[in-house]
Image (cartoon, coloured by chain):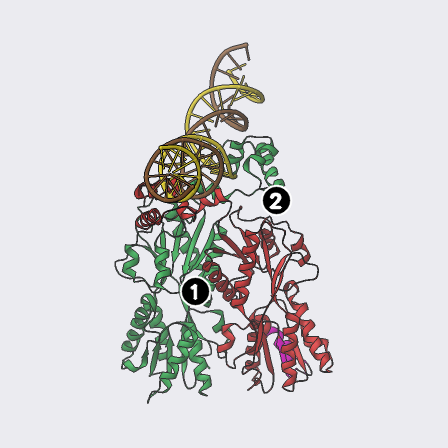
Chain colours: A red, B green, C yellow, D brown
DNA sequence: CAAACGTTGTAAATCGATTGGAGGGCACCA
DNA sequence: TGGTGCCCTCCAATCGATTTACAACGTTTG
């Protein structure tokens, strides 16, 4: 229980504090005998350097923050898990911040929250306008996830949403659908806009008419929003024969509504999602979806942030594009 | 960018450092005028106390850790979200630790990990034997989630799993099922054992024979495990007419298998889960399940831990029982 | 044999916030 | 005007690790 200090280790190993510090911080000029002695003492005493003291002195804590709208949302939970793992591999710890999708919470992230403890932030905004984020003087390195916007100045990691949405829509077209709806066009932080762009582009490429009645904004990106939007679509005089949902939760909600209505998927209505959460893989019917490589995303977001933290600062801004695949499952190929 | 210090605030407000500290730490004997001046300076400079320095000095960081098997698992994601919220309300921050269900990871939690930064731990073990946990000298207050075991010495918050499982099984019996399987009896850290106890108790109470072939251990608590176990059950010469799955993920996996087999739920097989994750509420059919009050759980786990942290120490061990309800949905009442 | 080198010890300062004690200044009351 | 509180300042020490500068020691090498 008595907290062991560096000096305790030094005493135990019969060396000076300086030497122990040298060992811990991988300094050159240390005999392997000394190093062994010190390491033995460290494990014997189960010594763990005091994070507060170290961070206070070094100005680095090896903590980074991940700011996401909500961790109970499967996509963010999976992302958080991947980022935590990626960080842990590099010896750093991730603090997860739920912004609750509120502007206030996100603003808090942008201000130097958490009193200089964290070394940097991976931020997945949802309400804050991109332009505002760029202006924020965070004092800490910041990597953005999610849709990019022109003229940004921050490092960025994201899927090419336009292309992915184009692919998803083209897939629906390729299986013979002609009346394709989109759910989620009003989505946060530009997501809706960008994915709609890909969707419209595909319709145009296929020479299909664009019907505004088939573009549903909804109020959020959850299952219930998808369910509600789908109900609206079914109430249309001429309901769609396919739906592209801008994330998997919306799609799962839509599937629920379709099941309640007694419609067959994909026979009556085909459904495509976006995110590839595990939930969709086990659903009946399983969900066709855009599958971003989350491990890649996590690795690179963390890597990018750590480079920023290590680097003196003025390197050029970088934009990484996350690889993705279209996972074709039962919801479009009965 | 220049990190503002306490002394900067003092200078700006025209008072001494001590006074600013007094204001921040809510000391008595401060004129409202002075307080106002200081607070104005704080907001003007956007001052945030340096967590490292404060924690070093005070020996408290207002950080607690939540150690869970994996945050990508919906139940834990929802729990983590609830606990984060509960903690934030009290001004403290939650670090989430994924033990990955590995003994090593859990052991790390038990050792005083994170170098004295955290004030306490909320621990949801899965592989570590309960007895071992009790013995661990964590040096930090620890609250356990999950199944309790006799003779424990640590604070504990959990659902009465035996009773809940009894209720779940009785519900299946009450709708006329007679051949009721259980999936997950081999589950981690005592969960399987305790829930099986309630399951068997219900069978016995109803005078139903207990068939060992209907108790599936499986290898984990994920969808794929549930799907695999269900396949085994269907391969039986005399398959069950109902299944009680020890968590919702298992149940969702089982539902998937049933759908693939072309069986109707609940007509052919009724299914009950445990946890009430959002996923099950939107599934078709929606999942009947034991619904623990997660908000209550979060509030009380955090509250209990904070009391421990604040208290000098020797208060008696406490055991809190989380309220739950049986949510009857389509998977048992078509 | 002496200079050079490599390894470790000593001593002291630093990071920023907190805290205790001694004392100064002020207002208010008698 | 003298006295009593109350509010606040000043000074110094502390938390634990890191880091700098320099000294001391032993070994190797020219």
Mark 2 touches mark 1? (CB < 8 Å): no
Nearest the viewer among A309 and B171 is A309
Q: Is residue A234 magenta?
A: yes
Residue B34 in view: yes
| Mark toward the start of the polypeptide (2 vs 1) | 2
Residue B116 in view: no
**Magenta residue span:** A227-244
Question: Which residue bears the numbered disc 1?
Answer: B70
Total tally of numbered discs in the picture:
2
Nearest the viewer among B285 and B37 is B37
The residue at 47%/50% (across/down) is B92
Residue B310, percent from left and from top: 39, 45
Asked which secondary structure carries label 2, the reply is: loop
Asked which secondary structure carries label 1, the reply is: loop
B254 with respect to A221 (left or right): left
- Circle 1 residues within 10 Å: few <14, some 14–19, many ≥20: some
Residue B267, percent from left and from top: 43, 85
Chain identity of mark 1: B
Nearest the viewer among B267 and A300 is A300
Tell me the distance, in whole angstroms, between the alpha carbons under discs 2 and 1: 36 Å
Question: Which residue bears the numbered disc 2?
Answer: B1
* Quadrant containing the N terminus of chain B in the rendered view: top right
The residue at 63%/54% (across/down) is A315
Residue B201, percent from left and from top: 28, 74
Residue B315 drawn above or below residue B25: below
Q: Is residue A117 magenta?
A: no
- Identify the residue at the far bottom of this view: B237
């Amino acid at each position: 229980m008595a907290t062991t200090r560096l000096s305790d280790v030094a005493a135990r190993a019969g060396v000076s504090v300086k030497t122990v510090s040298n060992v811990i911080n991988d300094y050159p000029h240390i005999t392997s005998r000394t190093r062994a002695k010190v390491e033995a003492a460290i494990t014997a005493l189960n010594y763990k350097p005091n994070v507060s003291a170290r961070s206070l002195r070094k100005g680095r804590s090896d903590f980074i923050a991940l700011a996401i709208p909500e961790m109970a949302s499967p996509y963010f939970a999976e992302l958080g898990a991947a980022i935590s793992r990626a960080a842990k591999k590099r010896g750093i710890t991730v603090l997860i911040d739920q912004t609750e999708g509120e502007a206030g919470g996100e603003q808090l992230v942008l201000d130097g929250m958490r009193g200089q403890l964290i070394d940097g932030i991976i931020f997945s905004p949802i309400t804050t306008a991109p332009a505002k984020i760029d202006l924020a003087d965070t004092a800490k390195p910041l990597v953005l996830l999610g849709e990019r916007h022109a003229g940004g100045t921050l490092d960025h990691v994201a899927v090419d949403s336009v292309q992915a949405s184009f692919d998803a829509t083209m897939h629906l077209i390729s299986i013979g659908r002609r009346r394709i709806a989109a759910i989620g066009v009003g989505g946060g932080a530009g997501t809706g806009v960008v994915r709609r762009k890909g969707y419209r582009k595909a319709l145009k490429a296929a020479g299909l008419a664009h019907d505004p009645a088939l573009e549903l904004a909804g109020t959020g990106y959850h299952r219930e929003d998808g369910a509600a939007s789908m109900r609206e679509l079914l109430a249309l005089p001429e309901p769609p024969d396919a739906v592209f949902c801008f994330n998997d939760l919306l799609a799962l909600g839509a599937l629920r509504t379709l099941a309640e209505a007694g419609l067959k998927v994909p026979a009556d209505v085909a459904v495509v999602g976006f995110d590839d959460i595990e939930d969709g893989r086990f659903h009946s019917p399983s969900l066709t979806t855009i599958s971003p490589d989350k491990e890649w995303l996590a690795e690179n977001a963390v890597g990018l942030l750590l480079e920023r933290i290590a680097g003196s600062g003025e390197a050029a801004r970088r934009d990484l594009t996350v690889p993705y695949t279209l996972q074709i499952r039962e919801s479009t190929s009965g």
